[in-house]
Image (spheres, grey):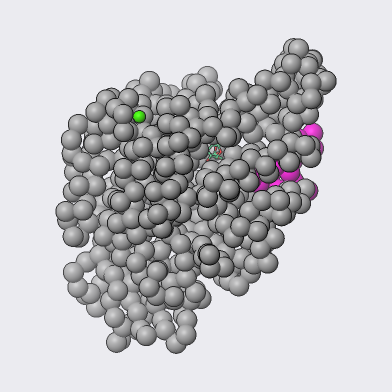
Amino acid sequence: KLEKDWWKKAVVYQIYPRSFQDSNDDGIGDIQGIISRLPYIKKLGTDVIWLCPVYASPNDDNGYDISDYCDIMKEFGTMQDMDELLEKANAMDIKIIMDLVVNHTSDEHIWFEEAKKSKDNPYHDYYIWVDGEEGVLPNDLKSDFGGSAWEYVPACGQYYLHFFSKKQPDLNWENPKMRKEIYAMMNYWIDKGISGFRMDMIELIGKEPMQMIRENGPKLHTYIKEMNAATFGKANLLTVGEAWRADIEKAQQYSNPDGSELSMVFQFEHMKLDKQPKTPKWDVTGLRFQELKEVLSKWQYGLEGTGWNSLFWNNHDLPRIVSRWGNDGKYRVESAKMLAMVLHGMKGTPYIYQGEEIGMTNIALSNIKDYRDIETLNMYKERLEEGYTQEEIMHSIHLMGRDNARTPMQWSDCEYAGFSKHEPWLCVNPNFHEINVDQALKDKHSIFYTYQRLIQMRKEMEIFSQGDYHLLDTSDQIFAYERNWNNQKLVVIANFFEKPCAFPDIDIEGMQVLLHNYEAIDGKQLRAYEAMILFKG
Ligand code: TEU
Ligand code: CA
């Protein structure tokens, strides 16, 4: 029997199956590959895996376009493999949470194949349609992957809505029959023994497209409450909703401690601070570091006692953090450890994205043909037409493209980094000779062991999950905060930059060093990316 709110002490490891481990040498990661790496995940110490979609899919958006929720993608294996993964993981005390993609399906899902046949097909109303004439769009709503959010189907004389690719039609959450089918599907997975859901773009399900309302629609929380009551509410699961536009108040609602909605959300306010508000992610500026401190602190204070935070720098949609806000050259190891300490010292549930724990970096491919991500490829075409130079576009892709996170996991310095013996579906980062799991495990000062220690401390010391948070006032380039709990105190001090700076005016007298990315503390200065976690009990 699971302890109530067990997920407050959990650390989650995110797996992108296509890029994790290939077991049958076809160049594509698969479920048997994941099974073979469970001991590695155990060694790191994470106790929950978030598995990106493994369902049947034509892969227009790498599995986020699902054609059958109760079947497994052929390239990844079979339902038997999935059952084996669940069984073996659970036997090792590793829980599995599944990606739940219910804002949309694939256009190859049987529901949509039926729905598009005619207006009076019983499945028609599972999707969102607007009468119209070819060439006259219902309104200006845009797809996240470029172009209009509307696509015309002549057989119906109507447009359907797709907030992502046109192969990802949006489901109509107004339809109670459709909702019931989704809940039945969720219960099917719960009965199989999964421990939770990561809910893809859940903030969109209350949309009102004719009123131009995308996220945070009027019925959003009604649907989430209904889903909770019909499915995971009774099962004590970890649920995390993807909510790009949540503010504190909305997050309090989503993660209400009364358990009526979700455990927590992924909010992205802190991950948008290297661009101007309301501009595309491709138009990167420098990181506004003061705002980063303010925003992360605001969320720590804001959800104290009234909700729960998720803590992350990375996922399969974001560039690698060590390349983005650390230093992936000379100070790769120091800066990766610093970023880990700053994040894992906070209150919330930390998420680690595969490869982050060994400091994997972004990749810069020179030929657009080597990229695979639909968002990247569509943007490339669109911006070329708009007159951007090839150079400008490639620069944006190198900084922000989603394939940065999706290159194969670097296990060893063997061919294809030990990911596969066959050429992988997406290039291996050429730095795999230096950056790989084998190397990390052999080096007791590696980034891996910093993560391992951070996870271990969270399990052993309640102050990490329970202590309250307080930002410390320091100079421009330092991030420092303390946590307090039961007369214990934790202090995290980090120099976020390469340039050394004076040691901050923080009383650390008599404190024990729990973790540090340099050999010894120099009381006068903080060196490049120097970070430490101190404790007094
Ligand atoms: O991401 C939603 C989402 O907002 C992203 O598409 C985002 O706009 C972009 O990646 C950041 O630039 C989720 C999934 O995480 C993503 O992989 C899917 O492509 C998307 O939903 C559609 O299911
Ligand atoms: Ca394979």
Q: Is residue 463 left or right of residue 58?
A: left
Closer-to-camera residue (106/278): 106
What is the magenta segment's predominant secondary structure? Answer: loop
Q: Quadrant of the C terminus?
A: bottom left
Residue 260: x and y in percent read 69, 60
In this view of the protein, can residue 321 be seen by the observer? yes
Q: Residue at x 79, y 21 (%)?
A: 121
Q: Quadrant of residue 147?
A: top right
Residue 20: x and y in percent read 35, 39
**Is residue 326 a member of the stretch shown in magenta?**
no
Closer-to-camera residue (515/4): 4
In this view of the protein, can residue 298 be seen by the observer? no
Q: Is residue 229 left or right of residue 50?
A: right
Q: Residue at x 38, y 23 (%)?
A: 368
Residue 180: x and y in percent read 73, 41
**Is residue 212 a member of the stretch shown in magenta?**
yes
The relative height of residue 492 versus residue 205 in the rendered view (above or below) is below
Closer-to-camera residue (265/246): 265
Q: Is residue 365 left or right of residue 481?
A: left
Q: Quadrant of residue 12?
A: bottom left
Q: Quadrant of ligand 1?
A: top right
The relative height of residue 528 versus residue 141 in the rendered view (above or below) is below
Task: Report the magenta residues as a range.
Answer: 202-218
Q: Residue at x 44, y 75 (%)?
A: 462
